[in-house]
Amino acid sequence: MVNYIKESFEELKSNVSWPSWAEGQNLMVVVAVFSILFALAIWGIDTVFSKAISFYFGLIN
C-alpha cells in the first residue's frame, strides 16, 4: 500500500501536465458560471414541477 501511494505521488509529479495559474483561474470561472447556470435551471424546473403537482392535487380535492 505504501508503495502504491509513493508511485501515485511520483506519477502526479512527473506524468501529469498541470495548467498554468492563469489557465486554472480561467477554468475555475467557467466551472463556477456553468455551476450557477445549472443550479438555476434545476431550481426553475423544480419550481415548475412543484406548482404543477400542487395544481394537480388541488384539482383532485
Image (spheres, rainbow, N blue to C red):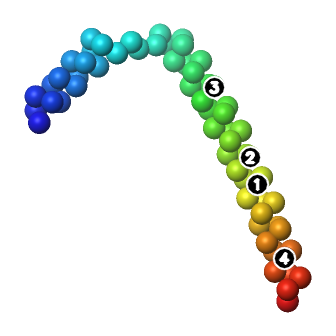
Element type where label 4 sits in the image: helix
Numbered label attached to residue 30? 3
Numbered label attached to residue 41? 2
Amino acid type of disc 4? Tyr
Q: Residues within 10 Å of mark 1 (few under 14, many from 20)?
A: few
Q: Are marks 4 and 3 in contact (CB under 8 Å)?
A: no
In the image, residue 47 sits, relative to residue 31, either above or below, namely below
Element type where label 1 sits in the image: helix
Residue that numbered label 1 is attached to: 45
Sooner in the amino-acid sequence: mark 4 or mark 3: 3
Amino acid type of disc 1? Ile
Report which quarter residue 59 is drawn in.
bottom right
- State how far apart marks 1 and 2 are (Cα): 6 Å
Q: Residues within 10 Å of mark 3 (few under 14, many from 20)?
A: few
Tell me the residue at 54%/13% (across/down).
23
- State how far apart marks 4 and 3 are (Cα): 39 Å
Residue that numbered label 4 is attached to: 56
Choose mark 1 or mark 3, whichever is in front: 1
Amino acid type of disc 3? Val
Tell me the residue at 79%/72% (across/down).
53
